[in-house]
């Protein structure tokens, strides 16, 4: 049996005829960008995250850079970022002219190791990696002691909790991506900023459309980063199903944890206080590449997140980063393998993955 890592047709099929109705509603409305669908989604997603404000934007990278821009983070500033994350986290810092400073991560959760933080920066970005919240208590304590701005990259954590609070409400402002593979995914690109600060939300709203409060009257220098009506309509449909889909991801993760417990693989962990939403299920093994090849031969698709890490890409090697600078993250990157965990997988497909991994690992 072939098992795909992600099949967008299943995601769309899970919302049935409602998807066609939503598309037809947008087509007949005469409003295609930043209209009533976006406003309704912003209101609903803010309530879901437990914050006062949501601002829809073009993608997750823009969401993060707009937060930074709104607070005046820019040239001459350093921003602490986890070593183990998508390059987009680092790029958002670079796009505003600031300097990303890599911080190593904890081997168990892949999230930022707060014991490695330095006070020399202007801000810190915590990443809720693979659906597991960062240690927001420790990040907040450190930032408070050293007067740092704190931002949450929640692009992989739609619906996750940290000590009873939703991802998206754990910092001064949070950035979400709605790329199709996310737990809450659109039919294309999309993103959002969430915050409880009305002034910050209003500043982001100005920045997302050329600094306009009214057409052509730019009050500040802004970008063009807008969520369109079609994506907002799709996201509204899927938001109503998100908690159920996340629960299915937890069921699949439990099945993997039980089925792979005796294989010698390092399995993902969840710390007390965190409610994981399993955007990815990532195992580590020194023979990762060989194991992945065997799984591919068996028809089981896997992915590697992330190799190379941001600091080892050509873009950041040019800034002086190199091998050995962030040792824990680099070891994890060479061993990590992501298994399929779409909520639309059947139990038989999950069992097929377990059997395939056990065989590939020599069990």
Image (cartoon, rainbow, N blue to C red):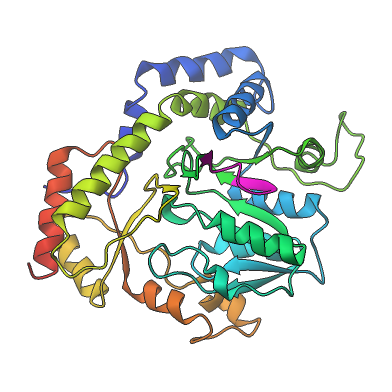
Question: The magenta stretch spans which residues?
Answer: 165-175
Residue at (68, 22) in percent of width and height: 35
Of 304 and 263, the residue lying toward us: 263
Residue 128 drawn at (x, y percent) = 50, 53
Q: Was residue 174 drawn as part of the magenta stretch in this picture?
A: yes
Examine the image and state in which quarter residue 44 appears.
top right
In the displayed structure image, the side of residue 232 where residue 66 appears, left or right? right
Residue 222 drawn at (x, y percent) = 82, 46
Examine the image and state in which quarter residue 107 appears.
bottom left
Residue 305's place in the image compared with 348, above or below, is below
Of 314 and 265, the residue lying toward us: 265
Residue 91 drawn at (x, y percent) = 63, 63
Residue at (57, 18) in percent of width and height: 26
In the displayed structure image, the side of residue 314 where residue 124 appears, left or right? right
Q: Was residue 304 drawn as part of the magenta stretch in this picture?
A: no
Examine the image and state in which quarter residue 363 appears.
bottom left
Residue 134's place in the image compared with 57, above or below, is below
Residue 65's place in the image compared with 307, above or below, is above
């Amino acid at each position: 049996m072939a098992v795909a890592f992600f099949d967008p047709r299943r995601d769309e099929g899970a919302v049935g005829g409602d998807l066609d109705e939503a598309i037809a509603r947008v087509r007949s409305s005469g409003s295609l960008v930043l209209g009533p669908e976006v406003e309704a989604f912003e209101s609903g997603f803010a309530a879901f995250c437990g914050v006062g404000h949501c601002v829809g934007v073009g993608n997750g990278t823009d969401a993060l850079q707009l937060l930074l821009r709104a607070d005046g983070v820019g040239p001459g500033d350093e921003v602490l970022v986890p070593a183990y994350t998508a390059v987009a986290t680092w790029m958002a810092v670079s796009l505003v002219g600031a300097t990303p400073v890599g911080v190593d991560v904890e081997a168990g959760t892949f999230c930022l190791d707060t014991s490695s933080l330095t006070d020399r920066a202007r801000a810190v970005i915590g990443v809720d990696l693979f659906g597991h919240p960062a240690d927001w208590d420790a990040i907040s304590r450190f930032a408070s002691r050293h007067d740092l701005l704190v931002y949450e990259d929640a692009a992989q954590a739609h619906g996750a909790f940290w000590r009873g609070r939703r991802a998206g409400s754990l910092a001064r402002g949070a950035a979400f991506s709605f790329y199709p593979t996310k737990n809450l995914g659109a039919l294309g690109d999309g993103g959002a900023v969430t915050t409880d600060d009305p002034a910050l939300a209003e500043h982001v709203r100005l920045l997302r459309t050329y600094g306009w409060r009214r057409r052509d009257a730019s009050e500040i220098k802004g970008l063009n980063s807008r969520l369109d009506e079609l994506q907002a309509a799709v996201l509204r449909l899927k938001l109503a199903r998100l908690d159920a889909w996340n629960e299915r991801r937890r069921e699949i993760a439990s099945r993997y944890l039980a089925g792979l417990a005796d294989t010698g693989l390092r399995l993902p962990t969840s710390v007390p206080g965190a409610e994981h939403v399993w955007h990815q299920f990532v195992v580590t093994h020194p023979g990762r590449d060989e194991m992945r090849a065997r799984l591919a031969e068996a028809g089981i698709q896997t992915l590697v997140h992330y190799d190379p890490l941001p600091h080892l890409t050509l873009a950041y090697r040019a800034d002086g980063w190199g091998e050995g600078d962030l040792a824990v993250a680099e070891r994890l990157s060479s061993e990590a393998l992501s298994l399929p965990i779409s909520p639309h997988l059947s139990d038989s497909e999950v069992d097929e993955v377990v059997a395939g991994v056990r065989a590939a690992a020599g069990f």
